[in-house]
């Protein structure tokens, strides 16, 4: 129980990082491996990856966040099915239910994750951080409360030098140089 609690706290730490996190999955992500991937914002798997939370086949349950994160990603009914049956999914199956963001050729998940990271870092770092904060902070609230979270996050980006750099770069038809 103490080990699982440490995993739960570690994975929660990953999920609450203020920067985007990307899981690159090759091979098996079963049990704790998938729970770690679920703590990430984006999941990319190679075509030979196998994903699942098979703990019920051992008479236990996912204890490092899987029972809470999986339904938030794939929906309650599908999460129950996957956990109750200890299903193991191929990357293609995982992609089809929205468990992963991309299914790429085998052995290319890391390079695909790096490519995704490069797309992200081209954007304004404050905007990216506040976008993550707005989504994470509002997703479990009522729409009215969530819109207030968005409003608070927007207030933190609207008066930044990066915002002016983005507008100026757009008008001048050049790539922005953000400072964060």
Image: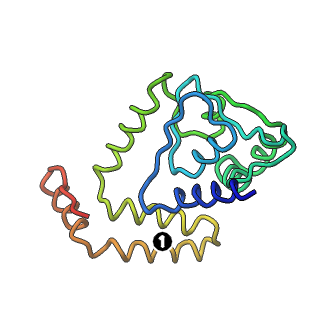
Is 172 placed left or right of 131 in the picture?
left
Is 102 placed left or right of 98 in the picture?
left
The image shows residue 35, relative to residue 86, as above or below, that is: below
Residue 75: % across, % down: 71, 49
Residue 10: % across, % down: 57, 57
Of the pair 26 and 179, the residue shown nearer to us: 26
Give the residue displayed 53% in from the left and 34% down from the top: 25
Quadrant location of the N terminus in the rendered image: bottom right
Q: Please rate how many residues cluster around mark 1, counting C-alpha atoms within 10 Å: few if below 14, some from 14 to 19, many from 20.
A: some
Is 44 placed left or right of 52 in the picture?
left
Give the residue displayed 37% in from the left and 44% down from the top: 117
Give the residue displayed 64% in from the left and 29% down from the top: 50
Which residue occupies the extreme front position in the image?
A: 2
Residue 152: % across, % down: 44, 77
- Report the number of numbered marks: 1
Residue 36: % across, % down: 59, 47
Which residue occupies the extreme left position in the image?
A: 172
Residue to which mark 1 is pinned: 150
Give the residue displayed 52% in from the left and 56% down from the top: 14
Quadrant location of the C terminus in the rendered image: bottom left
Which residue occupies the extreme right position in the image?
A: 59
Of the pair 156 and 68, the residue shown nearer to us: 68
The image shows residue 98, relative to residue 154, as above or below, that is: above
Q: How is the image coloured?
A: rainbow
Determine the secondary structure under disc 1: helix
């Amino acid at each position: 129980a103490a080990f699982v609690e440490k995993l739960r706290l570690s994975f929660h730490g990953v999920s609450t990082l203020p920067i985007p996190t990307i899981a690159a999955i090759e091979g098996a992500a079963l049990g704790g491996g998938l729970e770690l991937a679920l703590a990430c914002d984006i999941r990319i798997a190679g075509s030979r990856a196998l994903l699942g939370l098979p703990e019920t086949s051992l008479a236990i349950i996912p204890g490092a966040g899987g029972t809470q994160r999986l339904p938030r990603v794939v929906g309650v009914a599908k999460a129950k099915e996957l956990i109750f049956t200890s299903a193991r999914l191929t990357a293609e199956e995982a992609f089809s239910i929205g468990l992963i963001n991309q299914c790429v050729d085998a052995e290319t998940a890391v390079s695909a994750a790096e490519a995704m990271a490069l797309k992200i870092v081209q954007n304004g770092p404050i905007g990216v951080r506040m976008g993550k904060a707005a989504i994470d902070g509002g997703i479990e609230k009522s729409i009215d409360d969530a819109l207030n979270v968005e409003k608070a996050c927007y207030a933190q980006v609207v008066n930044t030098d990066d915002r002016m750099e983005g507008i100026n770069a757009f008008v001048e038809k050049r790539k922005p140089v953000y400072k964060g």
